[in-house]
Image: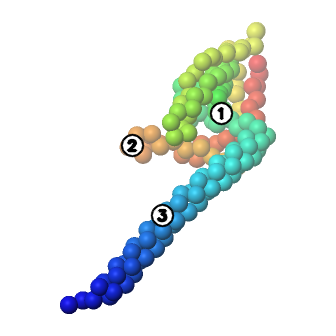
Amino acid sequence: MIKRSSMNIFATILLVALLASYYMFTERKTSSILENQALKTLDSSLAKQNQAKFLQTYEKTPLNFEENTGQTDSQVKYLSRGNGYNLFLTANKATLSLKKTKKRLLNKEENNAIMAVEMAILGAKPNANVVGEEEAPGKSSYFIGNDPSKWKTSVANYTKVRYQGI
């Protein structure tokens, strides 16, 4: 038969072990929660700083004009796209389509056109020659659909567009 004092010692050791395990688990869990909250706050702060730097750089970026090789309406000779706008240049007018950006879940954005402005030069020739100048280092590509023959790759971009013989 087991002595009562041995049973008390065993129960005490078991109780201490259970309490130590419980304490270690809850301490680790609480510590982990606090670390996660600190990381989220740090990530949020860094994200805001990075976003501000990106916007400062983006504002200084010059317009690029893409040659239309079939990625949009055939009347468009060159187009420029940016955050909140599309600019379409045809032989006789320029159309600026402004967009309102709405934040959606998961920080994705949805763009909805809210206004378009068309500009034309009075008395200009109806079919001026539109030419891209100063080719930019970047190229654009459009992979729409499954048919590679319809894909547009290495579309030239220019920093300037000139209307000749208006």
Is residue 127 positioned above or below 62 on the image? above
Badge 2: residue crowd in 10 Å (few <14, some 14–19, many ≥20): few
Question: Which residue extends farthest left?
Answer: 1
Q: Which residue is mark 3?
A: 26
Badge 3: residue crowd in 10 Å (few <14, some 14–19, many ≥20): few
Amino acid on which disc 2 is placed: Asp
Q: Which mark is residue 93?
A: none
Looking at the image, can residue 127 be seen? no
Question: Which residue extends farthest top?
Answer: 123
Looking at the image, which is closer to me, 166 or 70? 70
Q: Which residue is mark 1?
A: 83
Q: Which residue is mark 2?
A: 147
**Which is nearer the N-term, disc 3 or disc 2?**
3
Question: Whole-Å distance between the Cαs marked 2 and 1?
Answer: 29 Å
Badge 1: residue crowd in 10 Å (few <14, some 14–19, many ≥20): few
Is residue 6 positioned above or below 155 on the image? below
Looking at the image, which is closer to me, 103 or 135? 103
SS for callout 2: loop
SS for callout 1: loop
**x and y percent of residue 6 in the render?**
32, 88
Q: Tell me the residue at 48%/68% (across/down).
A: 23
